[in-house]
Structure formats: structure tokens, C-alpha cells
Image: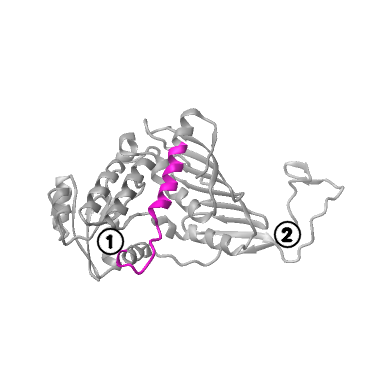
Amino acid sequence: MKHVIAFIGYGGMAGWHHSMIRENFPDFTVKGAYDIRPEVREGMKQKGLYAYESAEELLADKEVDLVTIAVPNNFHKDYSIACMRAGKNVICEKPVTMNAAELEEVIAVSKETGKIFTVHQNRRWDRDYRIVRKALEEGTIGKPYFIETRVQGSRGSMHGWRGYRENGGGMLLDWGVHLLDQLLDMIPGKVVSASCHLETVFSGEVDDNVKVFLKFEAGVSALLEFSTNCFINHPRWHVSCTDGTMVVEDWECNGRIVKLAENAEEMAWADDIVYTAAGPTRTMAPRPAHTQQILELPEVKTDWADYYKNVVGAIEGTQELIVKPEQCLRVMKLIDLLFEINKHGGAAACDI
């Protein structure tokens, strides 16, 4: 089945979507885009795209059956609703809306119109995330109890419109929405408590350095960090489980698993104190090498194009939608709570 797609907003992310579609989906026709900037519309024409003069012109185009929305966050809700009411299926860039209440309005219109609505949570297909998820699903190092997940840069403030509160800027909505989505997709059960520190160091009005702490009813705790002023990075993932530890160092997925060796004898407490560079200790003395086993990270193949393949399958009724709006609603409810916690400090019990 042929599908005709158009974009609302044609900045960096829409350009990425366009390249992804052009390279992977010969059955797609990318017809054109609407962007408020005249110079961008002129650039579209040079690429052979039709430059809609208004959003209303795009919405009236009966050929278009799928619209990808890639504009600042505060416009997501209205454009999503308008597209579905015009008979279009919708892919919305993340964060899907400014808050959970807005998303509930969007979901209601999706049900009312019967149109597919999904969110571009493409980082469920990131290789580093899939490696961690596979290791936990296979029980390679037992049951997880503490997960640390971080993205860290060193350029300081947020870029462009992401530095403004009215546009829905800040690190929690920019990167936090990805890492929260990954954790909620990977860890079963609800989040039962949360706390956070949302710091505004360079950006003036939005959070640019963030730490979030979550507790899941499954007994797993998670620490999430998003920073723009880190010059010595922590690992991308550090996962503590009952039978070992896993580290994914970076986006290239360097790392390792260290676990209990097969048939390793139970560690016994000796009367002798072990002397280390930090002085005498028993509890923090290094484990003998023969009781450990070093493993490579599991092999995982991922393809971001699978996101679009699933959306097409959902439109055609051959696949169940993977990124469901109800899942994104959980993430937005959690983000709403974190913003509220940050106003007053401390932590909050929850049922999300």
C-alpha cells in the first residue's frame, strides 16, 4: 500500500525523518512540508518538496495520509488534534505534549476519529538500551535492583527554542522523556516513589542539569542523570544485579559484564584484615579473581527504521502499535510529578 507523508515543521528532526524514509521506504511518497519560516519553505522547493503555504493547506490535502509533527513542543497538541480531525494519521515528535492533560485530549481525539496516533520514541531501538534489556530479560546476572542511566554533554545551555519554558524546553522534557520511556518500557510494574533535582545552571529559565531517582514496585531503583556541563562522563548504563554488574560505557556500546563464576564458593569472612591503598578493610576488600567471570555484552542488532515499519503496519492493520499513546501518558504523568516535586523539594509517593 502506498502512503503519502507530509511534515509540519521542517527543521533538523524533520530532515532526519525525511532521510530515514527516503533511504528505507520506497513505498512512501514524501510530498512536502509546512514550516512557518519562508527561507525554509524555499529550501524545501530546492529539494523537490512541495512547500505548503499554511497548515490549513496541508490539512486539506486529501493525498496525505500520514503527518509527522516536528515543531516546538507547545504546538504538538493543537497540530496533532487538527491532523487527526482532517483524516490524517499522526507521528508526533517527543515530548508528545507539554503535560499529561494535553495528551489525554489528544488520545480522546484519536479514539474519536479512529486515526493512528503515536510518538517518536525512537530510542527504544537504541542499541545500548536493547543490550541492557536483553541481559535483564535473559537473567544473565540475576535480578536487577539498581539501574543508573545517563546522558551527559559539556556544551552548557540548551540550544535554540529548547532553552525557553514557553516552548517546553529543558533537559527533562528533551532527554528525560527518552530515558524515562526506556525504563518504563523495560521494568515491569509501577513507579511508587520519585525525587529529583532540576538545576538551572546556564539556561536562565529551564532545567539544564538534572538528577532523578525512582523506585519501582518490582523492587528496582533507578538513577537518571541528564547534564550539559559534564567534562568527565559516567558510563551510559551501570546496572547492579544480584549475581553481577553490567556496564555500557558509551553510545558505541563498549562495556562488559562481571558476574559470579560458575560454582564459585561462598565468600567467607576471615579474621585477617585486608590492607588496601585506602587502608585496612574487610567489607570493601576486592573479590578474589577466581570467583568472577567476565562476559561480553550480548549481541543485539537494531534499526531505527523499524519504528516506521511498525507505524505503517499499524495503519494497515497488520501490526500492533509498539509506541502506544497510553505508555507515553505514563511518562508524561511522571514528568508532571517531577516538575511538581522540584517546586517543593523532597520526594513523593506515587502510583504511576
- Image quarter in which the N terminus is found: bottom left
Pointer 1: residues within 10 angstroms few (<14), some, or many (20+)? few
In terms of sequence position, does the residue under pointer 2 or pointer 1 come before the other?
1
Cα–Cα gap, marks 2 and 1: 49 Å
Q: Nearer the viewer, residue 341 or 234?
A: 341
- Which of the two residues, 68 or 352, is positioned nearer the viewer here? 352
How would you rate the neighbour count of disc 2 (Cα within 10 Å): few for under 14, some for 14-19, many for 20 or more? Answer: few
Q: Is residue 327 above or below residue 281?
A: below
Q: Residue 19 bears which disc, if any?
A: 1
Q: Can residue 42 be spotted in the picture? A: no
Lateral position of residue 260 relative to residue 61, left or right? right
Q: Is residue 318 magenta?
A: yes
94 to the left or right of 282: left
Give x and y (percent) for residue 293: 68, 63
Q: Position of residue 144 (x, y in %)?
A: 61, 54
Q: Residue at x 59, y 53 (%)?
A: 239
**Which range of residues does the magenta coloring cover?**
315-338
Spot occupied by residue 111 in the image (x, y as percentages of width and height): 32, 54
The image's mark for residue 289 is 2
Q: Nearer the viewer, residue 76 or 190?
A: 190
> Which residue does the image show at 40% across and 60% down from the upper left?
322
Query: Residue reaching furthest front?
Result: 112
Q: Main secondary structure of the magenta part?
A: helix
Along the horizontal axis of the image, is 293 left or right of 191?
Answer: right
Label 2 SS: helix
**For the residue marked with disc 2, what is the amino acid?**
Ala
Q: Amino acid at mark 1?
A: Ser
* Residue 290 on image: x %, y %: 74, 62
Evaluate whether residue 53 shows in this view: yes
Please, what secondary structure does the residue beneath circle 1 have? helix
Q: Specify whether residue 244 is painted magenta.
A: no
